[in-house]
């Protein structure tokens, strides 16, 4: 890609560590001592609704404060960083329902993801300072490449509101990716996507992960997708990790079946695994 | 010391007007979620009405009759404003507005056709220059009325959950219109409104207290308590239900139209009372509403736009703070006190002062 | 559909001027080539050029209120520009970044008083001795106007940002009240000046005779006219550039998806303050121009009523519309002069106009063309017209 | 030079801008009425040297923008020869550049005037001067402590300036300087502060309503010092202020006089009164005491016009006007008008009288003839 100058923090991805994380809203405890060491590459995070998956993301992106325990990005404690600081250190995320400016173009929305990458201030923008224009152009080029990667290049200058929900979610993923994250948190990226959208999304993600050593955490209900994508999966139940390991281990773990998959999955599970590229 | 007491009494009187306007604003806000910038102006209209009936040259009604009629007018007028102007913007029917517009325009057109001719941008069209006999202009006007009605019906959008800004602007427009209506009907001279008690005073220790001060403060307190009780009642609860969540309340079979009509009537009544008391104790003048509405809103803010006691106390505090600051420090500081208070309070408590207020963000 | 896209793609590749990425997708929204693409640039420049030469080409001669051949008309147009400039700034704040800040009457006053005081000659330094009543407020700092103006505007922008601080914490209507109060407070502080600022040598009570800045000795009105026009053009251009580039999209993000700005590395607070600062700059500039036109300033001119005037201008013209403020200002000043001799009626009309604008034309006059285009019967006409052409 | 085309022996158009709406309307209406009435009379009498006069007027609400646009309109569109009787300290200075630029003379009770501008002639004592007269009267009544209550604008500052100036003359003590916000009727703090100070004389520079409230405040407190205001805010000779308070409270209230009381029994005033009762034109519903003022001023203007001897150029006008110091225009109802050359000479009138209100007879009586302030 022609945009290496931006990939400031893709070098030596520090693993993301959750160290005995507790979160409680008033009385009810949402996370009770979660310990995870996310590795580079795909990490799956599954569990029934209300298990606290999104809460983990909210802690990582600074919406929620952990009542005890720490979240470590490499060796820096995230508590020491403000939200914007976390972005500069390479944590990007998407939301369950896409948070996009609907009356702005797709390109503009994606450009928001590069906010921290811009060097020149708004004063130079006003006088249309050449260097600033060049910077803008380069940023747009990068965003366009990203959109092309995910097959949205032709919609780049359409109003985001006109796109299908699926495409909007992909746009949001692009917006997260152009920030060159070292850790990318995807909250149900595939929910509401058509089959071919999913294929495009996953193909894109795979490529990115292969190229960089991005640590990618996916919350997803579509078990097939998770099992096909993620070498390692964490199962969250009532704020605790009840199981973790390879797809095979997870899907055969009785505790998981009991809590989440529901009995009668095991045999069904096998034949879905038979055709990994079904998705 | 007596000086300080004296100032406090004066402050309480001024405060009671702020509090009453604030209460009127809060009642409307609670039940229809409209920030009514025109509240004080509506009250002033009623106050002038009372004065006109009692002291005016044409009519010399006995004081209490005048007050009765004037307050009734205040309530009805409040209801009318809601019925014609606010309905379309709060998702209710726009029919009344259309009818009103049609009729008033028809009336204006009769006048225009008859003598003045139509406004500049079309009067060059031959035949629109005016000067028709009454009959002809009557016909022309009547013909045009249905068109206006249809136009208004078509183009006045019924907007559900419209945010505060347009509503605020609407009431600002209303303020201007009312202001000049008052000037047209009641003239622009300041007027003294003589009440049976005005001018009489009594002493407690060596503190002078005017009867009008007692009446104003007492009325303020009474109305505040009355409203508090009312909002515990069945209707009061319904009002709040409407404000909190209009659609659900409607599904529960609460008639939003009637409720908000009632709320606006009450708001108008309270504001009318406030301005009449003020007129009786000081003077009636065009500018007084403009000065009072901001103070009223400040009182309402101190009550978080929901709490009646909070609003009442807020108004009183502002009044007393002004008077005492003016007396003890310098009178040139007095006008800034209310502003300073609200700014500081909002910096310290962004959600308003009362716990109740935190439940609902305005 | 997709086919069409492909064809466009080919065209972009052939157009050298269009910036594309490696595989030829245009980086900037594709413009129609040639004149068509530049339509807005051309029209706006054209309009402003005409406005700049208006005093010498009385094309509005038939129209007394705005007849540029007379001082009367020229003054009115200058007022229109000043209001429009303030409106553009207001537009950026309310219409674009969706923040309901109402301190602009105060900021406007800052611009007017600031330039008046700074550029007034240094005389009459002693509060007790000089005959202040005979000579209203000619005591100041003797700065050249063109130095005072930018300084005042920048200071006003900073103060505006300061006023914006509640915006970080307050929601909707609370913010409106807080900023309204702060605006009033500014005016109050100004009107305290006879006592408060006597140290600042401005010593005649609250009214100030504004020292007239004569642009190349062109006389008070012409220079006031051009200062007002400059204020409009500068704010207008800044508005266009900003709303179409990074600042614009960032402000939009703060408006629409504030919740998500944190994980994008955007500080909502900072950008709200930026919006306040920029719009305050515009307001102060407009205030200075207004003062040059009025030649005298008085706190009573900057009470809530001025704020309401600005709101009327904004709403009549159209919230968030590029040309809205200018159109609105023209309508407003026209109304005010047309019904000048019957002020009672005038304020009734302004009130009704505002109410009708809210009820009938929420997007203001600037939205009329679009509305016409979208309205059913116009489209119907167009279709007929097309079919007629085809058949013939 | 507009007006001259209409010029010699033709119709002369004179303009005025007054507040017919808003709070000052009651004054503005009457000011217009006085002018219109005088113009009608002079035209009925066949004009002066074959000139008859038209009065063109515009409404400003005492607002800067309105006043400046009005003056521009009167100059450019109505092409007036000059302005007579335009007033309004809150906004009038905004018109100076326009007037100076067009060279159109302005002949009226302007306050504040500007001693640098050739076109502006001030035909009445300034507010400061009226304040000084009030204070002189206080002192003559044996007052030793003075309090000042002013609006937070020019009026207040001018009153304060007067008090400070006379302090050095008489050597009394200023015990309170209080302020009341424009358009506000929260007067209690100021009133209480003054009561606390226990001043013998109180000089107020407020609008009618505020004056009324202050008087009742004093009355209720059983505190009755000498209270005096300048002509405009006292409405001396009229009911504008005294009608806004209980009769007893207004008893003994003092007002400075720029112009004789409307019920003065002199030939000139009787003549005016008869005219005013008969008059039924624009501005009839205003308060009569103000109409006598402009009536007198425009009479003076007519005298001056007569002295122009048919040469109606602005040069000649200024030349003749600036010689008035040697041969003043004497209108019985106002102090002699003796304009001199610049600088300072265009403040043509000086000195004022004082009148007191009696609630028993519901009338004003002049207690101090027109005099210069002590210095």
Image (cartoon, coloured by chain):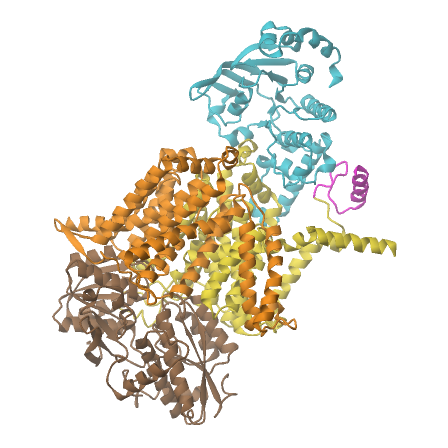
Chain colours: A cyan, B orange, C yellow, D brown
User: Relative to B216, is C91 on the left or the right?
Assistant: right
Q: Position of residue D46 (x, y in %)?
A: 42, 93
Can residue A68 be seen here? The reply is no
In reply to whether residue C7 is colored magenta, the answer given is yes
> Residue D253 versus residue D283: which sits nearer the camera?
D283
Rendered-image quadrant of the C terminus of chain C: bottom right
The single residue placed furthest to the right in the displayed view is C392
The residue that appears at 75% across and 50% down in the rendered structure is C32
> Residue B54 versus residue A12: which sits nearer the camera?
B54
In this rendering, the count of numbered labels is 0
In reply to whether residue A7 is colored magenta, the answer given is no
Can residue B139 be seen here? The reply is yes
User: Relative to B66, is A203 on the left or the right?
Assistant: right
Q: Position of residue C137 (x, y in %)?
A: 36, 66
- Relative to A92, say whether A232 is above or below: above
Q: Tell me the magenta residue range.
A: C1-28
The single residue placed furthest to the front in the displayed view is B135
Rendered-image quadrant of the N terminus of chain C: top right
User: Relative to B166, is D307 on the left or the right?
Assistant: left
- Relative to D239, say whether D326 is above or below: below
Q: Position of residue D324 (x, y in %)?
A: 33, 88
Q: Quadrant of residue D242?
A: bottom left
> Residue B327 versus residue C248: which sits nearer the camera?
B327
Q: Position of residue B286 (x, y in %)?
A: 37, 61
């Amino acid at each position: 890609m022609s945009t290496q100058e931006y990939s400031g923090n893709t070098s030596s991805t520090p693993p993301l560590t959750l160290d005995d994380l507790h979160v409680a809203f008033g009385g009810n405890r949402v996370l009770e001592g979660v310990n995870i060491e996310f590795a580079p590459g795909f990490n799956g995070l599954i569990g029934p609704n209300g298990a606290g998956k999104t809460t983990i993301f909210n802690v990582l992106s600074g919406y929620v404060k952990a009542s005890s325990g720490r979240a470590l990005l490499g060796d820096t404690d995230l508590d020491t960083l403000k939200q914007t600081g976390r972005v500069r250190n390479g944590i990007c995320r998407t939301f369950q329902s896409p948070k996009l400016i609907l009356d702005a173009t797709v390109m503009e929305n994606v450009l928001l993801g590069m906010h921290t990458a811009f060097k020149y201030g708004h004063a130079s923008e006003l006088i249309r300072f050449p260097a600033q224009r060049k910077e803008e152009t380069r940023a747009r080029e990068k965003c366009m490449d990203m959109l092309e990667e995910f097959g949205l290049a032709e919609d780049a200058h359409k109003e985001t509101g006109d796109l299908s929900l699926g495409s909007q979610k992909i746009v949001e993923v692009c917006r997260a990716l152009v920030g060159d994250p070292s850790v990318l948190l995807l909250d149900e990226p595939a929910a509401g996507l058509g089959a071919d959208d999913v294929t495009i999304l996953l193909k894109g993600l795979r490529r990115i992960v292969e190229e960089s050593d991005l640590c990618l955490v996916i919350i997803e209900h579509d078990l097939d997708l998770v099992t096909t994508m993620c070498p390692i999966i964490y199962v969250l139940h009532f704020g605790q990790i009840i199981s973790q390991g390879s797809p095979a281990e997870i899907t055969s773990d009785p505790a998981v079946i009991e809590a989440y998959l529901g009995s009668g999955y095991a045999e069904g599970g096998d034949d879905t695994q038979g055709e990994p590229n079904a998705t | 010391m007596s000086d300080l007491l004296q100032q406090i009494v004066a402050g309480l009187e001024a405060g009671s007007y702020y509090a009453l306007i604030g209460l009127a604003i809060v009642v409307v806000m609670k039940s229809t979620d409209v920030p009514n910038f025109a509240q004080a102006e509506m009250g002033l209209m009623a106050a002038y009405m009372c004065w006109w009936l009692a002291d005016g040259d044409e009519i010399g009604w006995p004081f209490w009759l005048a007050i009765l009629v004037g307050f009734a007018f205040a309530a009805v007028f409040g209801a009318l404003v809601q019925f014609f102007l606010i309905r379309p913007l709060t998702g209710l029917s726009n029919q009344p507005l259309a009818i009103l517009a049609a009729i008033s325009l028809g009336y204006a057109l009769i006048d225009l056709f008859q003598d003045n001719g139509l406004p500049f941008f079309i009067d060059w069209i031959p035949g629109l220059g005016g000067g028709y006999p009454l009959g002809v202009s009557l016909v022309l006007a009547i013909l045009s009325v249905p068109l206006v009605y249809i136009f208004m019906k078509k183009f006045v959008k019924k907007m559900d959950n419209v945010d505060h800004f347009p509503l605020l602007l609407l009431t600002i427009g209303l303020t201007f219109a009312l202001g000049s209506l008052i000037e047209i009907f009641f003239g622009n001279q300041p007027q003294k409104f003589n009440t049976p008690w005005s001018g009489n005073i009594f002493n407690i220790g060596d503190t002078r207290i005017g009867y009008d001060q007692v009446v104003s403060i007492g009325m303020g307190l009474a109305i505040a308590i009355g409203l508090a009780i009312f909002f515990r009642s069945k209707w009061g609860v319904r009002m709040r239900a409407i404000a909190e969540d209009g659609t659900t309340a409607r599904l529960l079979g609460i008639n939003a139209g009637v409720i908000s009509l009632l709320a606006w009537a009450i708001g108008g009544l309270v504001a009318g009372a406030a301005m009449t008391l003020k007129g009786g104790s000081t003077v009636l003048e065009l500018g007084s509403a403009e000065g009072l509405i901001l103070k009223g809103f400040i009182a309402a803010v101190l009550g978080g736009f929901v709490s009646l006691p909070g609003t009442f106390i807020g108004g009183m505090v502002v009044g007393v703070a002004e008077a005492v600051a003016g007396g003890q420090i310098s009178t040139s500081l007095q006008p800034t006190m209310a502003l300073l208070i609200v700014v500081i309070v909002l910096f310290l408590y962004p959600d308003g002062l009362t716990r109740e207020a935190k439940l609902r963000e305005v | 559909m997709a086919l069409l896209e492909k064809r466009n793609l080919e065209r972009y590749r052939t157009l050298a001027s269009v910036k594309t990425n490696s595989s030829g997708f245009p980086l900037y929204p594709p413009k129609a080539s040639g004149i068509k693409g530049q339509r807005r640039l051309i029209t706006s420049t054209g309009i402003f050029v005409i406005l700049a030469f208006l005093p010498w080409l009385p094309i509005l001669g038939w129209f007394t209120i705005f007849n540029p051949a007379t001082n009367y008309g020229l003054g009115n147009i200058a007022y229109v520009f000043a209001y429009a400039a303030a409106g553009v700034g207001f537009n950026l704040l309310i219409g674009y970044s969706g923040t309901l800040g109402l301190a602009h009457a105060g900021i406007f006053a800052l611009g007017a008083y600031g330039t008046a005081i700074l550029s007034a000659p240094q005389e009459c330094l002693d509060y007790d001795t000089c005959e202040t009543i005979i000579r209203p407020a000619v005591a100041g700092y003797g700065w050249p106007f063109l130095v005072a103006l930018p300084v005042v505007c920048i200071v006003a922008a900073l103060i505006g940002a300061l006023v914006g601080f509640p915006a970080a914490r307050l929601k909707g209507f609370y913010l409106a009240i807080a900023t309204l109060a702060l605006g009033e407070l500014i005016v109050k502080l100004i009107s305290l000046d006879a006592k408060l600022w006597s140290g600042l040598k401005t010593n005649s009570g609250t009214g100030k005779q504004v020292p007239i800045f004569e642009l190349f000795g062109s006389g008070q009105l012409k220079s006031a006219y051009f200062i007002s026009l400059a204020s409009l053009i500068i704010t207008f251009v800044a508005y266009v550039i900003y709303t179409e580039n990074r600042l614009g999209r960032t402000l939009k993000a703060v408006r629409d998806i504030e919740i998500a700005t944190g994980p994008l590395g955007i500080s909502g607070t900072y950008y709200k303050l930026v919006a306040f600062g920029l719009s305050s700059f515009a307001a102060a500039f407009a205030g200075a121009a207004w003062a040059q036109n009025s030649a005298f300033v008085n706190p009573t001119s900057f009470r809530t009523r001025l704020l309401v005037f600005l709101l009327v201008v904004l709403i009549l013209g159209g919230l968030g519309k590029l040309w809205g403020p200018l159109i609105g200002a023209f309508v407003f000043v026209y109304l005010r002069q047309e019904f000048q001799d019957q002020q009672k009626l005038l304020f009734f009309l302004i009130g009704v106009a505002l109410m009708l604008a809210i009820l009938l034309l929420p997007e203001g006059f600037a939205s009329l063309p679009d509305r016409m285009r979208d309205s059913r019967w116009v489209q119907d006409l167009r279709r007929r017209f097309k079919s007629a052409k085809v058949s013939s | 030079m507009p007006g001259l085309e209409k010029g010699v022996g033709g119709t002369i158009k004179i303009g005025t801008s007054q507040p017919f709406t808003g709070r000052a309307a009651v004054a503005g209406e009457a000011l217009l009425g006085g002018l219109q009435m005088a113009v009608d009379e002079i035209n009925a009498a066949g004009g002066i040297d074959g000139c008859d006069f038209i009065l063109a007027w515009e409404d400003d609400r005492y607002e800067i923008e309105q006043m400046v646009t009005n003056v521009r309109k009167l100059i450019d569109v109505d092409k007036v020869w000059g302005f007579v009787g335009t007033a309004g300290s809150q906004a009038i200075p905004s018109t100076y550049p326009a007037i100076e630029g067009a060279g159109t003379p302005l002949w009226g009770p302007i306050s504040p005037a500007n001693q640098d501008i050739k076109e502006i002639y001030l035909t009445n004592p300034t507010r400061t001067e009226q304040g000084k007269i009030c204070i002189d009267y206080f002192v003559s009544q044996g007052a030793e402590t003075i309090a000042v209550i002013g609006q937070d604008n020019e009026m207040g500052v001018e009153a304060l300036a007067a008090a400070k100036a006379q302090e050095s003359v008489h050597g009394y003590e200023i015990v309170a300087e209080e302020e009341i916000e424009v358009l506000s009727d929260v007067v209690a703090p100021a009133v209480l502060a003054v009561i606390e100070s226990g001043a013998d004389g109180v000089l107020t520079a407020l609008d009618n309503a505020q004056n009324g409230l202050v008087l009742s405040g004093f009355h209720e407190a059983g505190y009755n010092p000498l209270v005096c205001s300048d002509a405009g805010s006292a409405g001396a000779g009229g009911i504008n202020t005294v009608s806004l308070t209980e009769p007893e409270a207004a008893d003994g209230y003092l007002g400075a006089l720029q112009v004789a009381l409307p019920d003065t029994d002199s030939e000139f005033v009787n003549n005016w009164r008869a005219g005013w009762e008969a008059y039924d034109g624009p501005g009839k519903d205003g308060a009569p005491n103000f109409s006598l003022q402009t009536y007198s001023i425009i009479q003076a203007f007519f005298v001056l016009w007569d002295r122009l001897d048919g040469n109606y150029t602005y040069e000649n006008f200024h030349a003749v006007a600036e010689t008035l110091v040697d041969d003043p225009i004497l209108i019985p109802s106002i102090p002699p008008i003796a304009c001199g050359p610049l600088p300072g000479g265009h403040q043509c009138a000086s000195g004022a009288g004082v009148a007191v209100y009696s609630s028993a007879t519901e009338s004003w009586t002049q207690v101090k003839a027109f005099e210069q302030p002590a210095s």
